[in-house]
Amino acid sequence: MTEHQIALIPGDGIGVDVTQAAMKVLQAVAGMESFTLHTGTFPWSCAYYHETGAMIPQDGIETLRGFDAIFLGAVGWPESVPDAVSLHGLLLPIRKAFDQYANIRPHRLLPGVEGPLKSGAFDILCIRENTEGEYAGAGGRVHQGRDNEVAVQTSIFTRQGVERILRFGFEQAQARRGHLTSVTKSNAQQYSMVFWDEMTRALAAEYPDVTVSHVHIDAMAAKMVMNPENLDVIVASNLFGDILTDLGAAIQGGLGFAASANICPDRSAPSMFEPVHGSAPDIAGKGIANPIAAIWSGAMMLRHLGEDRAADRVEKAIAETTGQGIGIRPGSHGTDEITDAVIAAMKG
Ligand code: NAI
Ligand code: MG
């Protein structure tokens, strides 16, 4: 029997609830499809920070490296730990250490879920560059607090970084409907984004089965609202992808349905799977967090591990559950109720 080693980092707030819910579903499907998920749970969180002075122990990254995948709930408790500390102390070090350069998020409307758009017929895969670009952290401030203060922040686009995210995008398009939309702003950003466009055109020759569109970020924002049904795979820089994926989450009905993966495509290190939402302190401990985003992220993890049949089964069960009206409106069903409905649908 195939065995997969999964590192669980439930984190804070509803991260704990939704991790538990997702693992219940994944263990159930593992039983049905005859593979084993071995889990190791790590309490790294804001509470852990209070106890130890760090979000993650010194050897934490090396510990995670031995796993096949990482499943994360959510991290952050702004009342007691500044978000910059929790984010930079745990999430970002993992993404960086394991070169998880592709952040991918599926945006489609599950049956029964009411999105804000008239048309619900869209199925988009957003791919965000996750390691450089506008978030490379290059810059500085001088003369702080004085009239002549200067702040500079420079985007970094490397040939290697741009090429690898574009290739990943082309490959995803090949596996889907064969269309790639590259999002830039090359009319205004005449160095970095023109470079990105040139790389896209050069690589397109190697993927003749993929049709490519070039769209500027501002036009793209409108397109995702007006004609999302024409989009297949979107590839964008770190900042543009960040913004577009929030828009994507909104059109698919909100954070309760937004799943994501941080992928290390060459598999030299584990990839990390997590719902897009945070720890939701306002509803933590109430048993009403929607686990669907986390369960969907779990299905993405199974697919990454090569368990396609199990992933299909989980995704189908999620769709059946929302199709029955379960988990489609905030607070209408509890976390456990939704989780049990997904498991029941997998059995059916
Ligand atoms: P949030 O995503 O935690 O919550 C935003 C709103 O959406 C809240 O009203 C919340 O109740 C609701 N919500 C979110 N997920 C839900 C779910 N599954 N079911 C039902 N309602 C849901 O964002 P917020 O409040 O800005 O951040 C809270 C903390 O989480 C902060 O410390 C932040 O830094 C952290 N955070 C962590 C992330 C991560 O670990 N990847 C991502 C986003 C935020
Ligand atoms: Mg964001």
Image (cartoon, grey):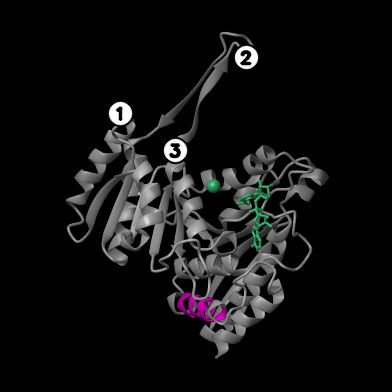
How far is disc 2 from disc 3 in space, using C-alphas? Answer: 26 Å
Q: Is residue 67 visible?
A: no
Res 132 label = 3
Please determine whether, in this image, residue 319 is positioned above or below residue 207: below
Residue at the right extreme, as displayed: 51
What residue type is disc 3 on? Glu
Q: Which residue is mark 2?
A: 144
Secondary structure beneath disc 2?
loop
Residue beneath the point at 68% across and 73% down: 332
Q: Is residue 239 visible?
A: yes
How far is disc 2 from disc 1 in space, using C-alphas? Answer: 29 Å
* Magenta residues (range): 311-321
How far is disc 1 from disc 3 in space, using C-alphas? Answer: 15 Å
Label 2 neighbour load within 10 Å: few <14, some 14-19, many 20+: few
Select label 1 or label 3 by which is in front: 1
Please determine whether, in this image, residue 313 is positioned above or below residue 220: below
User: In the image, is residue 278 part of the stretch drawn in magenta?
Assistant: no
- Earlier in the chain: of badge 1 and badge 3, it is 3
Please determine whether, in this image, residue 321 is positioned above or below residue 216: below
